[in-house]
Amino acid sequence: MENRKPDGDLRRGWTTGACATAATAAAFRALISGVFPRIVSITLPKGDVVEFDLETCECDDTQARASVIKDAGDDPDVTHGAEIIADVCPGSPGSGVTFKAGPGVGTVTLPGLPLDVNEPAINPIPRKMMTAAVQEIATEFGVANDLEVTISVPGGETLAQKTMNPRLGIMGGISILGTTGIVIPFSCSSWIHSIHRGVDVAKAAGITHIAAATGSTSEAAVKQMFELPEQALIDMGDFAGGLIKYLRKHPVEHLTLAGGFGKLCKLAQGHLDLHSSRSELDLGKLAKMAKEAGAGDALVQDIGAANTGLQALNLSQTANVPLADRVARGAREVALAALAGGTSVDVLVFDRQGNLVGQSNG
């Protein structure tokens, strides 16, 4: 079931990286002073100063813990409501700020990500945010910034199963993410980010053929067809443009695009965002494609008057007109044009049962 964008103005939220920074700043301040702030302020990468309430405040002479409940605003984020915990303790002299993954935060196990293997899955920008916050407080109190920071997320390992982390080789929990600190509702930036990282991981593993699917049915079918490893599979969803534009700058040898008839119809008609709220299937154009595939006038008229893409597909199959092949060819042409060279493409169209109904490989 799709998460549909509600009407009206939407409330922005905070990334896990921003929440981790706020918790780290509060815990470090308490470790030095023995007092937690009632409200903690941090500076986001673009200079905005924002405030957070604390959920947990614990401190003794050797370590401190603070936590923030993540508020994703009106975005359907799987980590909305998660508790982001920072445990801090003094680090070795001259070590600066170092990071560890606590329970619920993943560890990198495959190359290709912007972090080394065996590093905690705390991305570079959140690390910079936390380091800057620690440095600011250290300067205020005239102390060293040598600090060990452990970030934990209760239930994070379960939440990670709803993300692409396992496929990216991030094991044991979620990633601490965010480039701006702000979650823009329904921007789907985390999904597109995961698509990009999936390409990076595949390339680092030496994989030359990746398959991107619009859904689980087409992904399972294409995986079986080509016997591809897990890291070769990209959960593209509706974001064909997010994948194709990234491959234009980071090409692979071969790309298979796999999906349902309706989604790939929209790609064939030039849409790179395939979500139902952001692009529509034009049945008039589909009727013209049916005519190009050999449909007679009566069938062309019926397809143009169809209620759905599925009905149009059924009509064409009954008449033995290869409309799905024509759709696959159109989708391939759009993808190749957007890629502008460097990657070869084939397109596979599947029905809802996972049966191959159309294809184009040039």
Image: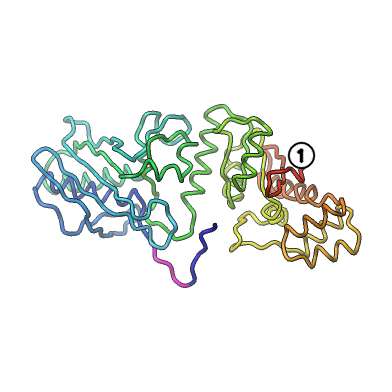
For residue 11: magenta?
yes
Residue extending furthest toward the top: 206
User: Viewed as shown, does residue 288 lie left or right of 15?
Assistant: right
Q: Along the line of sight, which residue is nearer the eye, 285 or 142?
A: 285
Residue of label 1: 361
Image point 89% across, 53% down: which residue? 294
User: Viewed as shown, does residue 122 lie left or right of 9?
Assistant: left
State whether the magenta stretch is mostly helix, strand or loop: loop
Q: Along the line of sight, which residue is nearer the eye, 90 or 68?
A: 68
Indicate the quadrant where residue 1 lies: bottom right
Indicate the quadrant where residue 223 lies: top right
Question: Residue 345: x, y in percent?
Answer: 70, 40
User: Viewed as shown, does residue 93 lie left or right of 76?
Assistant: left
Residue extending furthest toward the bottom: 8
For residue 102: magenta?
no
Image point 78% across, 50% down: which residue? 324
Q: Along the line of sight, which residue is nearer the eye, 306 or 245?
A: 306
Q: Along the line of sight, which residue is nearer the eye, 314 or 299?
A: 314
Question: Residue 19: x, y in percent?
Answer: 30, 51
- Mark 1, Cα crowd under 10 Å, few <14 / some 14-19 / many 20+, is few
Magenta residues? 8-12
User: Viewed as shown, does residue 128 lie left or right of 303?
Assistant: left
Question: Residue 298: x, y in percent?
Answer: 89, 64
Residue extending furthest toward the right: 296
Q: Amino acid at mark 1?
A: Asn
**Label 1 element class:** loop
Question: Residue 300: x, y in percent?
Answer: 85, 62
- Decide: is 5 above or below 257: below
Image point 52% across, 29% down: which residue? 204
